[in-house]
């Protein structure tokens, strides 16, 4: 081995994070810097969780308006509720005695799809980038969806992204979130969506869904589609976690989706193959 290879040091390159090692332990950090901010010396106790999230993803401190909108997003997304497919995935796993890790993984897997999942957020944001605030462009995209170049991973979305294919009218929570987000928005997409919601619903033939409001919020905050996908998945996990734990405590006998499909046999019946 050459002297050059002996002195070679493996380095992880990161624009996000920098550490200084403890003088007596090279495997422990004495100081951690996130985009130049001392996390445990400067941010701890001074920055909120959502302000820190913004710093991690965007590389800079949020303005008060940006922090307020992201805080609203965190509250709106924290618990989609047991009607949501990703939450149900976590509940199903937990009541079936899967580990807590498996329950959260189930929520992530189901919550990554085309129906109110992170994939729908990506497509909806792509529509925003393509259509902007031009109603005629939205009409073109919603009525004549553009085909994706790759369908080996994701099948084409089967409904207008950001809208509820099973809805009759725009739900009250969606309207409440849109109204509040429009008031605190740092961009123009949310106010434009509030103004043209009914027209867009008429064009799409479906009521606006929470995913449509969230996609517009991510656009106004300035996240790209990959950042938005990650953050959307993260922010929805608390609800999946608490509902999974709750259903585990109730047990399978009280879980309506399994109860009617199970028939418990005695040991004698099972051994006889009945």
Image: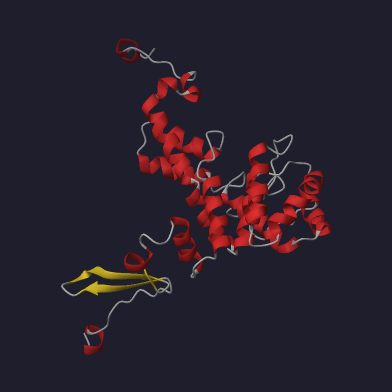
In this picture, residue 165 sits left or right of residue 231: right
In this picture, residue 200 sits left or right of residue 5: right
- Give whichever of 103, 157 is nearer the camera: 103
- Give whichever of 132, 271 is nearer the camera: 132
Give the quarter of the figure containing the N terminus. Answer: bottom left
Q: Position of residue 69 (x, y in %)?
A: 58, 56
Q: Is residue 102 above or below residue 68?
A: above
- Give whichever of 161, 134 is nearer the camera: 134
The residue most toward the bottom is: 3
Q: Is residue 252 above or below residue 71?
A: above
Which of the 4 quarters of the picture holds residue 207?
A: top right
Give the quarter of the figure containing the C terminus. Answer: top left
The residue most toward the right is: 136
Residue name at image x 65 percent, y 50 percent: 213
Is residue 155 something one can see in this rendering?
Answer: no
In this picture, residue 51 sits left or right of residue 158: left
In this picture, residue 258 sits left or right of residue 167: left
Q: Position of residue 247 (x, y in %)?
A: 42, 29
Q: Is residue 85 above or below residue 58?
A: above
Residue name at image x 53 percent, y 59 percent: 67
Q: Is residue 60 above or below residue 81?
A: below
Which of the 4 quarters of the picture holds residue 94?
A: top left
Residue name at image x 74 percent, y 62 percent: 132
Q: Position of residue 154 (x, y in %)?
A: 60, 52
Q: Give the number of marks.
A: 0
Is residue 129 something one can see in this rendering?
Answer: yes
Coloring basis for residues: secondary structure
Q: Position of residue 47 (x, y in %)?
A: 42, 61
């Amino acid at each position: 081995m050459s002297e050059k290879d002996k002195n070679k040091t493996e380095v992880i390159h990161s624009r996000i994070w920098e550490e200084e090692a403890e003088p007596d332990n090279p495997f422990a950090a004495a100081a951690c810097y996130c985009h130049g901010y001392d996390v445990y010396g400067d941010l701890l106790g001074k920055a909120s969780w959502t302000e820190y999230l913004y710093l991690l993803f965007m590389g800079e401190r949020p303005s008060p308006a940006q922090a307020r909108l992201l805080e609203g997003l965190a509250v709106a997304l924290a618990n989609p509720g047991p009607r949501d497919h990703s939450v149900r995935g976590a509940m199903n796993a937990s009541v079936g005695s899967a580990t807590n890790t498996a329950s959260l993984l189930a929520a992530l897997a189901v919550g990554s799809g085309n129906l109110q999942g992170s994939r729908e957020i990506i497509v909806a944001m792509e529509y925003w980038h393509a259509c902007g605030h031009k109603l005629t462009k939205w009409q073109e995209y919603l009525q004549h969806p553009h085909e994706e170049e790759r369908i080996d991973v994701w099948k084409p979305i089967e409904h207008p992204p950001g809208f509820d294919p099973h809805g009759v009218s725009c739900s009250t929570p969606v309207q409440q979130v849109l109204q509040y987000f429009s008031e605190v928005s740092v961009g123009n997409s949310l106010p434009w969506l509030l103004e043209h919601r009914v027209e867009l619903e008429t064009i799409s033939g479906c009521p606006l869904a929470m995913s449509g409001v969230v996609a517009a919020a991510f656009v106004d905050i300035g996240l790209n589609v990959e950042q938005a996908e990650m953050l959307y998945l993260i922010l929805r996990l608390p609800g999946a976690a608490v509902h999974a734990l709750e259903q585990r405590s109730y047990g399978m006998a009280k879980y309506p989706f399994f109860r009617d499909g199970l028939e418990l046999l005695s040991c004698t019946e099972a051994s006889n193959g009945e």
